[in-house]
Amino acid sequence: MSDKIIGSFTALAYLMLVAIGAAMSVAGVITKSVALDFGVDNSVIGYCFSFFSVGYAAAVLGNGLILTKINVRTEIVVASILGIIAAVGAAIMNSVVLFAFFVFLFGLGNGVFCSLGYSLIVKLYTCEAERSAKLNILNFFFSVGAIVTPFLAGVALERGITWQGVLFGTLAPVFAVIFMALSQKNNVALGDKPSARETTERWGIKVYLVGVAMLCYVVSEMSFTYWVVPYMMEKLTLDVALGSLFLSVFWIFMAIGRFFTGVFIAKVNTINYLLYGSGAAFLLFIGMLGAGDFYGSFLLVAGLGLAFSGLYATLVAYGTEMFIRPSSKLTTFFLTIGSAAGILAFVVSSYSKQMLGLSATMFLAAILMGAVFSLMFIVGKVIDTKVSNS
């Protein structure tokens, strides 16, 4: 496969992640306006937007079963059209139930984007270091969509543009995805017919341990992002504007970290990077929980964004290298864990907050990051050492 084809499909994967970041981040900005339009409480619309995550997870799992059977360009176009129909349906419906249904479809379309984006990178880049670098850049482009969209959406709402108009605005990268997909003269097969030996290949214990580590990571990160604003408001007696700064700085440094990880991780041993990153994240998390001043907490949260930044993509890269060939099934396994953990994070952290309080919820998130470090130590230093010595 030529470098030009690889480059064009890599760019297409990046653009799909921008679209996902835009779609995921707009909900918090428009929820109040949507609730006012429907005449319901904000929490009702919040529950409606939870169907996005359900659709997203279902698409990641379901798409993994058909990745090898459908033309990549065709699937991208179909997913894009589904997303467009979903956004239009959500904007014009007068029923909360139908609104939730179209939000679910919106999640389906973006879940297909996620599955395709990661699967393309895993297929195109077979070297572990290069794959890890490209996956981190992929996540950086998600951050671009997630950072830029809330700001632009907020400005648009302040200038009198309706929430429907803001929702339509998130379709701009989707139209760009369609245009780029249709302009591709070549195609990429995401699954080759395996040989008999490959068909009988079994996943080892390391794959499942990395899967558990990914689950712990996602629940930790999403618990933090769900609750850091009210946690800081309560702990440091801040108003919502100052409390929100902590989440903003976390995402900014997350994006910075993802970019530089994508550039430099090829020079670092992957398992060592996972150990350093998860270990630093755990220590910074504990430090943040113990900090009692605004500026110290602010710096620790910024450091936490950097430490978290490359872990998800590098876990995917490390896990998908544990098979003898690029495997869409294995990629789907890790992406499904990540998507399901996103739903689990909301349930677990909300229950913990209700029963034990905000401090205990954040402490649980820190412990889960410590579990990531422990699991990676077992996989990379205990199991690998035993294998090399046997």
Image (cartoon, helix red, strand yellow):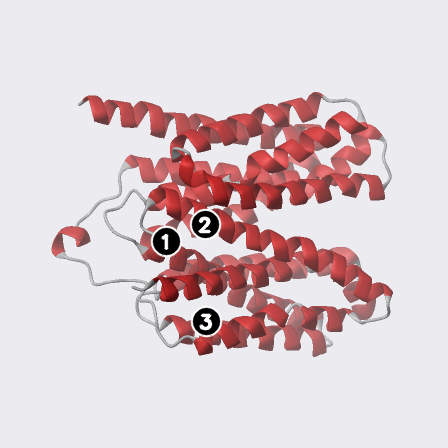
Residue 90 visible in the displayed image: yes
Q: In the image, 128: left or right of 104?
A: left
Decide which of tag 3 and tag 2 comes sooner along the chain.
Answer: 3
Tag 3–tag 2 contact (CB < 8 Å) = no
For the N terminus, which image quadrant? bottom left
Tag 2–tag 1 contact (CB < 8 Å) = yes
Q: In the image, 1: left or right of 149?
A: left
Decide which of tag 2 and tag 1 comes sooner along the chain.
Answer: 1
Q: In x, y percent, where is residue 70?
A: 34, 72
Q: Which labelled disc corresponds to residue 122?
A: 1
Q: Which amino acid does label 1 sit on?
A: Val
Q: In x, y percent, where is residue 2?
A: 32, 64
Q: Name the residue carrying label 3.
A: 76
Residue 357 visible in the displayed image: no
Report, in whole angstroms, how far the alpha carbon at label 3 lies from the one at label 2: 19 Å
Report, in whole angstroms, how far the alpha carbon at label 2 lies from the one at label 1: 8 Å
SS under mark 1: helix
